[in-house]
Amino acid sequence: MCRVCGGLNDDFLGYPSIVSDTPGEKTMPLRKILSTGSDYMNLMNRKQGEFIDSNPECAKCKYLNICGGGCRAMSFRAYGSVTRKDNETCKFFSEGWFDRVIETLRRVRPQAKSKLLTDNGF
């Protein structure tokens, strides 16, 4: 689950809607849910190529390596599939909000560097 979903109430975003279809995982200890081979991790552990195959428009997007298609939980909640792109995250990037945040951070803290951003040309 993405950093945004992780801190919010269970009723708000994707986690409950994903595990509600996975028998027993709602009552399992978190360590077991996050272990390799659990139904939840098999659902979440998708390769980027599998995602791109389902969303060819994302393959051309300059933000792909940062966005990664958005939140899998939001995708599952909206479409019942973790391989669809998260449209809200897509809007954040495609409508220029990410660039505005980066510009603001560079103005406020010009010495701050991010390997992820510099490696991707931002």
Image (cartoon, helix red, strand yellow):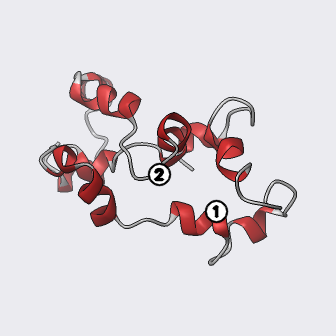
Does residue 46 lie above or below 117 as drawn? below
Q: Do the residues labelled 2 and 1 touch (CB within 8 Å)?
A: no
Nearer the observer, 15 or 118: 15
Q: Residues within 10 Å of mark 1 (few under 14, many from 20)?
A: some
In the image, farthest residue toward the right: 27
Residue 82, which numbered label? 2
Q: What residue type is labelled 2?
A: Val
Relative to 89, is 12 on the left or the right? right
Q: What element carries label 1?
A: helix
Measured as percent of width and height from the top left, residue 34 is found at: 68, 67
Disc 2 from disc 1: Cα separation: 11 Å
Residue 90, which numbered label? none
Relative to 28, is 105 on the left or the right? left
Measured as percent of width and height from the top left, residue 4 is found at: 55, 37
Nearer the observer, 101 or 71: 71
Task: Of the two numbered discs 2 and 1 on the same chain, state the one appearing first in sequence.
Answer: 1
- Which quadrant of the view contains residue 104? top left
Does residue 44 lie above or below 118 as drawn? below
Measured as percent of width and height from the top left, residue 66 is found at: 30, 48
Does residue 99 lie above or below 16 as drawn? above
**Residue 105 visible to the viewer:** no
Q: Which residue is drawn at 68% across and 74% down?
A: 35
